[in-house]
Structure formats: C-alpha cells, structure tokens
Amino acid sequence: YASEMNASIEEKLVLLEGLRGALEACVDPACQDPAACQFQLLYQPKVDLRSGRLFGVEALIRWQHPEQGLISPLRFIGLAEESGLVVPLGDWVLRTACAQAQAWHAAGLPPLTVSVNVSARQFEDKRLVERVAGALRDSGLAPAALELEVTESAIMRDLARSVETMRELEAMGVSLSIDDFGTGYSSLSALKSFPISRLKIDKSFVRDLAHNPDDQAIAMAVISLGHKLDLRVIAEGVETEQQRDFLRANDCDEMQGYLFSRPVPPGQIAALLAR
Ligand code: C2E
Ligand code: CA
Ligand code: CA
Ligand code: CA
C-alpha cells in the first residue's frame, strides 16, 4: 500500500514538473514558436435553443504531453490548482482565448462570445480583475465578448469578496456565468446578489434527462429560478435529440454538447458557424 501511495505521489510530482516546464515555454515572451507550446485550447460551440444560432464558444484546455500524449484537464487542473500554477496557466488561457476571439472578429466572423473557465484559486487571486483587463487590452477584444465561468463553490469561499470581484468585472463589461450550477451549494439569497447573466445546468443533470424524473425536476427548477432572476439558462452535455427536445419544451435558452459539436480547434469554428 505504501509503495503504491509513493508511486502515485511520484506520478503527481512528475506531472507537476512537466506542467511547470510546459507553462514556462508557453509564457516565455522570447519563444516565438507556438508549436513549442504543449497546451492548446479547443472551443465548444454554444447554441441558442430557439433559433439554433451559434452565439458563443467555451474555451477548454488540452495538454499535449511529449511522452504521455493528450492529457485531459480533469487530470491536471486539480494539480495546477493545488500548486498555484493555475494562476499563470489561467492567465495564458485568458490571453489565448481573447486573442482568438479577436482574430475571429477581425476575420469577419459573426459576433461570438468566448467563455473562459476560472478556477477557485484564480477567482481568489487579487490580481484577477487586472489580469482580465490586461488580456482585453492586449488582444483588443471588446469586454462584452468575454464571459467568465465560475463555480458556486469558488464564489462561496469568500462571498463578500467574490461579490466585489464580480461587480468589478461587471463594471468592466465582462459577463459572468455560474458553472456546474446545482452541484455546489450557493444559497438562493446569495445568488440574488450576484451580478451574473447565466446559469449553466451541469451535465450530470442532463445525462439522464430523457428518462429520469428527478433530473427533469431539477432542470425545470433551475430554468424557472434562472428566468425569475432574469438570467439566461444554458445546459451542458447535451448529446441526444431527446435531451434537447426536453430542454427546448421547458424553455431552456441555450445548449452546449456533443449533439451540436464536440470541442474543436479554432480553425473549425467558421465552418460550424456556416452550418
Ligand atoms: P466544465 O467547465 O464543466 O466543461 C464541460 C466538460 O464537458 C468539458 O470537458 C467538455 O469537453 C465536456 N463535454 C462537452 N460536451 C459534452 C457532452 O455532450 N457530453 C459529455 N459527456 N461531455 C461533454 P473537458 O474539456 O475535459 O474539461 C473538464 C473540466 O476541466 C471543465 O469542466 C473545467 O472545469 C476544467 N477546465 C477545462 N479547461 C479549463 C481551463 O482552461 N481553465 C480551468 N480553470 N479549467 C478548465
Ligand atoms: Ca465550464
Ligand atoms: Ca456559460
Ligand atoms: Ca460541468
């Protein structure tokens, strides 16, 4: 047991060292070779359920490890979070996503909002607002084209400060959405005070939506709560027509999931917009 534990600790340390090295290569201003960067962002379309229009994309990070191949964020975001590396890594994500969104705009694509995931540690970072302003300034992206996705648990860690951070971002013109809604706990009275524009129904409630009455009740409750608070409601993880039909029939606003598209490299977004 002890040796197994050592192996997993060692595995983590190796991954952490790799993460640190890969990150240095990406943020090194002297490095002009984007191919040297082991991280990449894929973009998953978000679609309006009534019009079918693709109105935005969520940036999702991937790590192309030289020995281990493609590594899912589920394997390294937690590690980046524990070690604090998520702050510079998140900054790279923010800058890359803003630059990409501005490049789509400059190429004449219809307006798209780009959503970036912000982890708890990043959200607590005193310089978050400054970092967001810097990414917008350097890319030239309009603040209204950027959305940050934050989880309830990240917000609830220090509620008063979170609300202040959210207000500063809102004042800047950046919009906020609550990710994985329903999986954490935020009190309804706290929710009322958040300057947010969207709730995202977590995919764990969408998976069995076609058959499971409990999940149906939860989805309907989130949609109705969101609308009463004047928020838009998006469902993630929509894979089947039955799930989509249920959401549409129950007045959900938007969806995201394999049914419309998997996360794709940035070059494929124009074709998806034309579809
Ligand atoms: P999330 O923010 O809840 O993102 C949704 C996840 O569901 C993504 O997994 C996405 O690829 C996946 N997904 C999308 N559509 C479907 C579908 O129809 N069915 C199923 N089964 N899954 C679907 P991914 O890309 O592996 O990301 C996992 C998590 O890692 C994300 O969950 C997010 O919490 C985190 N993450 C990803 N990129 C970043 C990043 O740049 N920064 C931070 N801080 N976290 C990130
Ligand atoms: Ca998300
Ligand atoms: Ca969102
Ligand atoms: Ca989720």
Image (cartoon, helix red, strand yellow):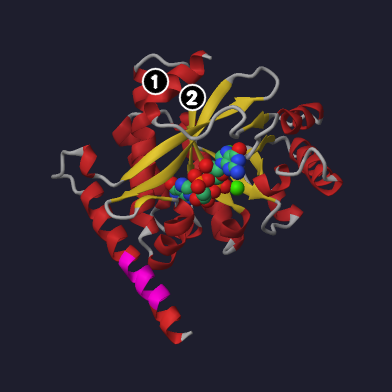
Residue, far bottom: 2
Q: Earlier in the sequence, mark 1 or mark 2?
A: 1
Q: What residue type is labelled 2?
A: Leu
For image coordinates 53% across by 14% down, the residue present is 275
Picture disc at residue 112: 2
Question: In the rendering, at what x and y percent does residue 136 appear?
Answer: 37, 36
Which quadrant holds residue 29? top left
Disc 1, disc 2: CB below 8 Å? Answer: yes
Residue 9 highlighted magenta (yes or no): yes
The stretch in magenta equals 7-14
Q: Is residue 233 magenta?
A: no
The answer to whether residue 167 is visible is: no
Horizontal arrangement in the rendering, residue 12 relative to residue 215 (left or right):
left
Furthest-left residue in this view:
30
Which element type, helix, strand or loop, lies under badge 1? Answer: helix
**C-alpha span from label 1 to label 2:** 8 Å
Q: Is residue 24 visible?
A: yes
The number of discs equals: 2
Which residue does the numbered mark 1 point to in the structure image?
105
- Asked whether 190 or 272 is in front, the reply is 272
Nearer to me, 248 or 107: 248
Q: What amino acid type is highlighted by mark number 1?
A: His
Taking 153 as reference, is 134 above or below it?
Answer: above
Instruction: Bin the neighbour count of mark 1 within 10 Å (Cα to Cα): few under 14, some 14-19, many 20 and up.
Output: some
Query: Which residue is drawn at the image coordinates 69% and 59% (left, top)?
Result: 185
Residue 2, above or below 89: below
Image coords of residue 268 (percent x, y): 42, 24
Residue 62: x and y in percent read 40, 45
